[in-house]
Image: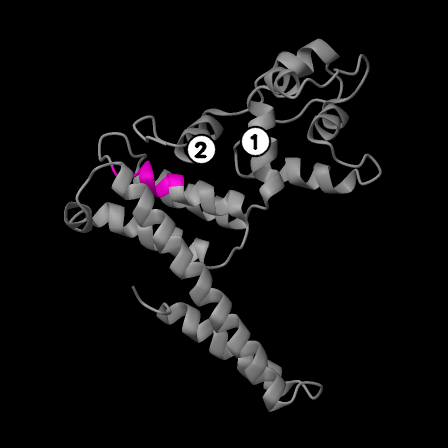
Amino acid sequence: MPQQAPGEEISILASEVVLQAIPFFGGAIAAIFGKAAREQYDSRLTKWFEDLGEAVSKLQIKLENLAQDPELVETVVAATAAAGKTMHEEKLFALRNAVLNSVDPILRPDEDLRLRFIGIIEQMVPDHLRLMKYFSSPRRWYEERQLSIPSITTTRSLAINGLGWENDDAARPKRLMEDLVTWRLTGLVSETMGTDGQIDRDFVTEDGKAFMRYIDEPASFEN
């Protein structure tokens, strides 16, 4: 297991150079930030490989066989690069499942979808993932959490209510929903639809459904 990927070393070195070029930051402070960045990256990457190795072992597949699969190795490299840049467990869980769902050549998505989905996970914040689960079935989301469904509301405010967000920050959920549309994971969210139409509609596109399958635990995974 490498301590650092070459790209990450370059990134950290560049950060140190930038810090040293700023008058406020002295060389010592830059070194401290650089050391902290390396330590945090090493720690995240070590945990990532440990969790991934444990998960792969549950699939009862020999690691030597996996290493001979160039498409899987490509997926692992892409997922590892993304995992090294986040501390959010939701994103790490999604990336781990993406690798597990790429193990079987028959079930894995095409290369363009695999790498595109991993790139999307890297750009996401955890609330993007929560929104995707909500939009897959708004009514189920409300029922599983035993939440009362507002009688008169917009699609956006219904989602804000269901996810427990503060209603006074309407700009953020709007931005998150627009991101999902941009990534072609959800369709356009209607603000004029009645409550029944909003709560019973599946807003997720075909790409979005493939994405959700890709980041979910594989059916053969034994807890």
- Would residue 30 be counted in the magenta stretch? no
Q: Position of residue 78 (x, y in %)?
A: 37, 53
User: In terms of image quadrants, where is residue 150?
Assistant: top right
Evaluate whether residue 194 shows in this view: no
Question: Which residue is located at x 65 percent, y 40 percent?
Answer: 176
Q: Position of residue 6 (x, y in %)?
A: 36, 71
Q: Which residue carries the number 1 mark?
A: 132
Q: Amino acid at mark 1?
A: Met
Residue with the most extreme top position: 196
Q: Position of residue 13 (x, y in %)?
A: 48, 79
Question: Which residue is located at x 57 percent, y 18 percent?
Answer: 202
Magenta residues span 97-103
Kindly indicate whether the residue at mark 2 contacts the one at mark 1 (C-beta within 8 angstroms).
yes
Instruction: Report helix, strand or loop for mark 2.
Output: helix
Q: Can you tell which mark lies on residue 211?
A: 2
Q: Is residue 35 above or below residue 138?
A: below
Residue with the most extreme right position: 168
Evaluate whether residue 40 shows in this view: yes
Q: Is residue 46 above or below residue 14?
A: above
Query: Pointer 2: residues within 10 angstroms few (<14), some, or many (20+)?
Result: many
Instruction: Report helix, strand or loop for mark 1.
Output: helix
Q: Amino acid at mark 2?
A: Phe
Instruction: Give the image's coloring scheme.
Output: one colour
Q: Quadrant of the N terminus?
A: bottom left
User: In terms of image quadrants, where is residue 166?
Assistant: top right
Question: Which residue is located at x 32 percent, y 46 percent?
Answer: 54
